Image (spheres, coloured by chain):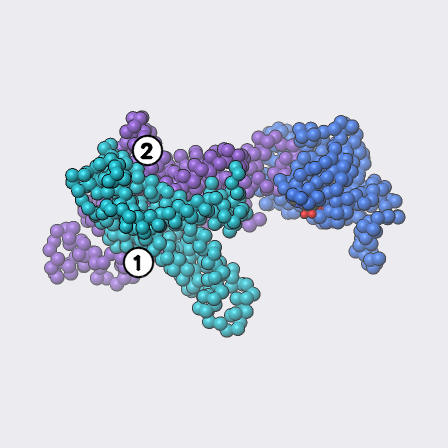
Chain colours: A blue, B cyan, C purple
Amino acid sequence: MAERLSLEGLVLASGETELVHGIDLAVERGEVAALVGNSGGGKSLSLLAWLDLLPPGVRRLAGTIRLDGTVLEGPGLAGLRGGVVGLVPQSPTSCLNPLVTIGRHFCETLACSGRAARAEAAGRLAEVGFATPERLLGLYPCQLSGGMLQRVVIALALCRDPDFLFADEATTDLDLESQAQVLVLLERLRDRRGIGILLVTHDLAVVARLADTASVLQHGRIVERRPVADLFASPRAAATRALLAAHHALYEGGTAA
Amino acid sequence: MPLPGPTSAWPWTLRLGLAMIVLLVLATLVGPALLSADPAAIDPAARLQPASAAHWLGTDPLGRDLLARLLAGARVSLGAVGLILVLVLAIGGTAGCAAGFLGGVVDAVLMRTCDAFMTIPTLVLALFLIGLLGTGMTNVVIAIVLSHWAWYARLIRGMTLELRQRDYIVAARVAGGSRLAIVRRHVLPAIAGQIAVLASLDLGHWMLHVAGLSFLGLGVAPPTPEWGIMISDARAYVWEAPRLIVLPGLAILLTVMGFNLVGDSLRDRLDPALGGTEAL
Amino acid sequence: MTGFIARRLASLVPLLLVVSLAIFVMLHLGRGDPAMDYLRLSQIPPTDAAVAQARADLGLDRPLAVQYLAWLGDAVRLDFGHSWVTHRAVLDDLAIFVPATLELTAAALALTLALALPLGVAAALARDRWPDHLARAVAFLGVCVPNFWLGYVLILVFAVGLGWLPAMGRGGLSHLLLPAIATAAMSAGVLLRLVRASVLGHLSARHLLFARARGLPRRTVIGRHVLLNAMLPPLTAVGLTLGELLGGAMVVEVVFGWPGVGRYALQAISNRDFPALQGFVVVMTLVFVLCNLAVDIAYAWLDPRLRLGLAGR
Ligand SMILES: Nc1ncnc2c1ncn2[C@@H]1O[C@H](COP(=O)(O)OP(=O)(O)OP(=O)(O)O)[C@@H](O)[C@H]1O
Ligand SMILES: [Mg+2]
C-alpha cells in the first residue's frame, strides 16, 4: 500500500496564459488534506493534471508527480487512475453515461460481470448510504436525483479500493443528511482502511471537521498551508482571513472584517 | 498543411469555391460569344467527332458542338437554381415570418402545412407535382420549390420567434410600429445572414435535383441543351463516346462543388462550434 | 417501450391526415380537368355528354368535402382505383414495382451505414491527420456527385471497362452493387460528416473524464462511452436520409434499368395517369413514415431518457 502521493512545482497554462504557477500538494496515508480557495483558482485543474486528465486546451508545463518517491510520467500517471487514486470530479451529476445503467458502470469499473459484480456493486452502494442498493443497479442516471448521483459517483470512485481519494467538492450538492453520511463514510475509510484523502471544498465546516492540514490556493498559488487547527486559530495570508471571515459571516451572523 | 485554417476569414475553400462559381458564370456569359460554334447547329457530316481544333470537346450524335452545348446548358441550370433560390426564400420567408409574428391560427395552419410537405420525401413530392402540372423546366422549378420551402419556413419561424423576445423588437412593437414594418426593418436584416448561409448550402443540392429531374426527361424539351438531359440523350452512346456522358456530369459535379465549398466555409464561419463540419 | 410506440403511432394519425389533405388539395389544384385526361386515355371523343358522364363516373360533380372523405376512405384502404393506362388496380401495380425500389434503397442504406459509421469515427479520432482529410474529401465528393452520373461512371469502369459486374437489370448481389453505390454516395457523405461531428462533440463529454478517471481501458472508453452516445444524433438523420435514398434510388433505377417504382412514376407522369400518381405518392410517403417510425423506435430503445419519457433531463 502506497504511503505518499505528491505533486511538486505544477505549472499549467492555456495558450499564453499561465493558470497555475508552480504549486506543491501531497496526500499521505491515513490523512485528510483539504484544498480551499477562490473559485477559478485552479483547484480542479490541479487534480486533473495529477492524473494526466487535463482538458485539451490546457498543458502541463512543469511538475513532478511522485508515488512513494518514484517519479511517474505518462503511462505511470494513467496507471494511478482508479486503482491507486479514486477521483470524484466536480459536478458529478454529469459524470455518468446517460445511456448506461448504474449496474453496468460498476461492472465495467470492477472489470467483472454477473452475480458477483452485482453483489459487490450493491455492497459499495450500501456503503454510501443507499438502503436498497439492488434496486438502483437497473436504473439509468436520469432516474436518480442529483444527491443520489453524487453518492453513486463516490461509490464508483472507491470501488477499486484506491489508496487515495481526490474529492472535488463531493458534498456540495447534498442535503445535510446525505452530506453527513458521506462525511462519516470518508472518516471511516480513513480510520479503518487508512485511505489518504484530498478534499477540495468551499465549506470550511467540512474542513474543520475532517481535515488534518489545509492548503489555501489563491489565483494559482498556494498562499498558506498549515494544520487545520492553526489555520483557524491564526490565519496568516490575507486570502485565508477573507475566507474565514466570509465563513463566520455566513454561519454565525457576524459581520465580515 | 500550410493552408490557413477554417477560422480565417477567407479560408482557401471559400476562395476556391468562389473562384469556381465566378469562372462558371463568366464562361456562360462570355463563352458563347467567343465560341464560333452554335449549340443548336446540326451537322450530320460531323457526328460523334472526337475533340479537335474546330470542336474543342468534340461533337454529339447530331454533330452539335459539345462545348457550346455545355455552356448553353449552364445557363439553363444556373438560371433554374437561381430562380429556385429566390422563390424558396420568398415563400419560406413569408410563411415563416407570418407564422412567427402573427402566431395563433395562422401559425398553426402554416406549421401543419409544413409538416405535410416535410413528411413526403422530396423527390416523391417533386415527381407527384410534375405529374400534376406537366413536364417542363418551369414546372421542375415549381416542384423543387414546393418540396423545399417548408424547411425554410420552419427555420425562419423559429428565428422570428426568438427575435420577438428581443428588447429592441419588443420596444418597436410597444411604440406601435406596424408588424410589416417591424419585420422589414428589424427581423429580415437580423436573419438574412444565417439564411443566406443555409441557402448557399442548398444551392448545390438544388442543382442536383434540377439535373436529376431533367435527366429523367421531365425538364427542358429536347433541342434545348441542359446538362441532365445531355447525359440522358447520350445513354445510347455509352460505349461509342463515353465523353458525351462524362463531360456534362463533370460540369454538374464541379458546379455543385463550387456551391458546396462556399456554403460549407460560410457555415463554418457562422458557427465554428459545429467543429469538424469543415468542407475539406 | 410499448407505451412509447403507442404514443408515436397515435401521433402519426393527425400527421397523416394533414398529409392526405395536402395531397388532395394539390391533386385538385394541380391537375387541370382530370375528366379530359380520362377520356383521352380511354380514347373516347370529348363530347359534352361524354365529359359530363366522365365527371359523374369519377365523382367530380360532388362537393369537395365529400370527394375528400371518399378519397380518404379509399386511401386508408390503400384503394387508389384502377390505373387509366394498365387498367389494373394501382396497388397491384405498385406491389410489383415498390419491392424492387425498396431492395435498392435497403442495399444503399446498408452501404451508407457501412461506409459512414467507421469512416466518420476514424476521421474524428484522427482529427486533422491524414485519415481525417481523406475521409472528409471522400464525403465531400459524395455530397457533390450527381447520383445518375456516378451510375454511368461506375458502369463505364466496372461493367464496360473491367467487366467485373453486370451493367443492367435486377438479379443477385452483383446486380445490386453498382446501383447501390450510386444511390448511397450522397447519403454516405452527409452521414459521414454527421458522425464525425458527433463523435468530436462527444469526445469532450464530462462522463468520459470520469470513465477515464476510473481507469477504464481506452477500448471501453471509446467503444462504449464515445461511440454509443455519438451514434444517437446521426441516427435521427438516418430517418431523413431514407427520404433522400428513396428519391435517389428512383433516379438511379433509370440508369441501371432497375424495374422499380421510379419507372412506374415516370410512366404515370407522361400519361397523366392520376390514380397511379396518387397511389405512388401515398404509398411512398407511407413507406417513408414507417421507416422513420422504425428509426424513432430504435432511438428510443437506445436512449433510456426517451424510452422512460424523461426527455430533457
Ligand atoms: N479547458 C480549459 N481551458 C482553458 N482554461 C481553463 C479550462 N478549464 C479551466 N480553465 C481555467 O482555469 C482556471 C482554473 O479553473 P479550475 O476549474 O481549476 O478552478 P477551481 O479552483 O476548481 O474553481 P471552482 O472552485 O469554481 O471549481 C480558471 O480560470 C479557468 O478559466
Ligand atoms: Mg473546481
Residue B264 place in picture, x, y as percent: 46, 46
Residue A194 place in picture, x, y as percent: 79, 32
Label of residue C154 in the image: 2
Query: In the rendered image, is residue B37 in sight?
Result: yes
Residue B71 place in picture, x, y as percent: 29, 47
What residue is at 30 percent from the left and 37 percent from the top? B246
Helix, strand or loop for disc 1: helix
What residue is at 25 percent from the left and 50 percent from the top? B220
Q: CA distance from mark 1 to mark 2?
A: 41 Å
Residue B83 place in picture, x, y as percent: 34, 55
C231 relative to A161 in the view: left or right: left
Q: Report the front residue among A184 and C224.
A: C224
Q: Chain of mark 2?
A: C
Which mark is nearer the camera, 1 or 2? 2
Corner quadrant of residue A185: top right
Query: In the rendered image, is residue C259 in sight?
Result: no
B172 relative to B79 in the view: left or right: right
Label of residue B135 in the image: none
What residue is at 86 percent from the left and 48 percent from the top? A235
Give the residue type at disc 2: Leu
Quadrant of the rendering where the N terminus of chain A is positioned = top right
Corner quadrant of residue A66: top right
For residue C229, above or below residue C11: above
Q: Which residue is mark 1?
A: C25
Corner quadrant of residue C200: top right
Number of numbered discs visible in the structure rendering: 2
Do dots 1 and 2 share one subunit? yes
Give the residue type at disc 1: Val
